[in-house]
Image: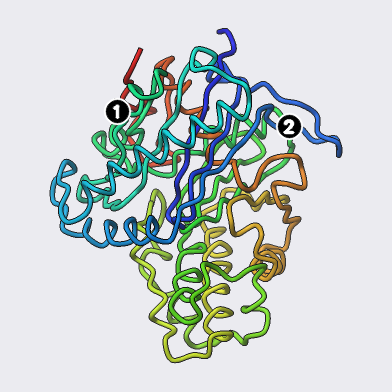
Amino acid sequence: MAMKRAIGLMSGTSLDGIDVALIESDGERIRVVKSANGFIAPLGPTGYRGYGEDEKALLREATRDAEAIRDRDDRPGRLGEAEAFVTRAHAEAVEAFLAENALRPEDIDVVGFHGQTVIHRPRLGITVQVGDGAALARRLRIRVVSDMRANDVAQGGQGAPLVPVFHRALAEAASFAGPLGILNIGGLANVTLIDSKGAMLAFDTGPGNGPINDWMKERVGADHDADGATAARGTVDGALLENLLGHPLILRTPPKSLDRNWFSHRLAGYLTVEDGAATLTAFSAHAVARSLAFARERPIRWIVGGGGAKNRTLMAMLERLLDAEVMNADAIGWSSDFLEAQAFAYLALRALEGLPLTYPTTTGVSAPVTGGVISGP
C-alpha cells in the first residue's frame, strides 16, 4: 500500500487543549527518521491549540452533564454547546496547522478526529466523544474519520485503549528487542505491554494527571503541578495511599478501560497542598506498578509519553517502582506531547483500509475489529 498523509487530533481528559500531528503511513508501516541521538521517530510536524479558561470551564461542565446520558446520542445540559465548540476549535487547529506548514487541504488524505470524551462506560455500552466529524469534514474539505471507539464497544469491547497498535508499529520501526512497556499519562494512564515475541497487552492502569490537576486547581488555582514540584515538597500519606490502591478498578483484571470521573482528588481533602499532591502522584505511580501483575513478561524498558512525562516527581517514582529503565518519549525522538495525536492519524489510515484498530488483548473485543465513521470527500 502507498504511503498517505494523515493529520491526527487529540483533546484529552486533562482538558488543556488540542494536539495536532501529521504522519505518513500506509496504515501498517510508518515513515520515520533517525533522530540526532540515533533513535527512530515518526516524520512529521506538530501543532497545538490551547483552551482558554472559559473553554475549559465549558468542557468541565459538559463532562458533569454527561453523567445524565443514557443513550450515546443524548446531549443533556451544555453538551450540545460543547460539541459545537469542540468541532469549531478542532477546525481552527487544523486550519492554523495547515497555514503554518504551507499545506493545502488536498495535501492531506485524512484527518483522525478523536473528539472530547465526556463519558466512558463500556459495561453499559456507552462511550461518547463529542465532536461532529461530518461538520469538520465539510469545513476543512478533507476526509475525516471520527467516533473510533463506538464499533469496538458495540462488539463487546472496552473501546479503549486505542493507541496500542500504533505503539507496536513504533516499537517495530525502532527495532526494540525484549519486553517493552509504553505508558501514556494523560488524565488517566494507559499502558501497552509488548512481550519478547511481539504480543500486545494493553489497558488503563488507573489515574494519571487528572486527580493531581484537579487538586491543584481547587487548592491553589493552578492547572497542574509543574515539574511535580509541589509533590516533591510533600509527604505521601501511606495509609491513604493503600486505601486508594484498593479501588476495585485498580484490582480488576484486564481488559479494562476507565472513566476520568472515577478517581476523585477529594479523597485527599484533609491534607496540605504538598502532601495531597505527593499522595495523588504516588497513587498514579503505584497503580502503574501494580499493572505488572497482569504482564506476561516484566518490561526491561519503559517509554513514557503524555503530560505526566514532564512530572519529574512522578517519573522518579515510576523508575523506583518499576525497577527498569524509564525514558521520556522525547529522549528517544518520539514525542511525549504528540504521541496520541500521531496515533489517531495512524488509526484513521487503518480505518480507511479496513484494518483492525482493536484486538482481544487490547480492549477485550472477541476478534480484531476496525472502526470509525468516515465523512467527507
For residue 267, what is the image quadrant? bottom left
Residue at coordinates 45% horizontally, 36% vertically from top-left?
Answer: 92
For label 2, count other residues whose C-alpha is less than 10 Å away and answer few (under 14), some (14-19) or many (20+).
Answer: some
Across and down, in percent, residue 234 comes to 63, 85
For label 1, count other residues whose C-alpha is less than 10 Å away and answer few (under 14), some (14-19) or many (20+).
Answer: some
The amino acid type found where label 1 is placed reads Ala
Per the image, the residue denoted by label 2 is 174
- Point out the image quarter for the N terminus: top right
Q: Pick whichever, 172 or 88, lies toward us.
A: 88
Per the image, the residue denoted by label 1 is 135
Q: Pick whichever, 250 or 140, lies toward us.
A: 140
Please tell me whether residue 120 is drawn above or below residue 352 in the rendered image.
below
Across and down, in percent, residue 9 comes to 48, 36
Across and down, in percent, residue 272 comes to 53, 90
Dot 2: element:
helix
Q: Pick whichever, 96 or 80, lies toward us.
A: 96
Across and down, in percent, residue 15 comes to 44, 55
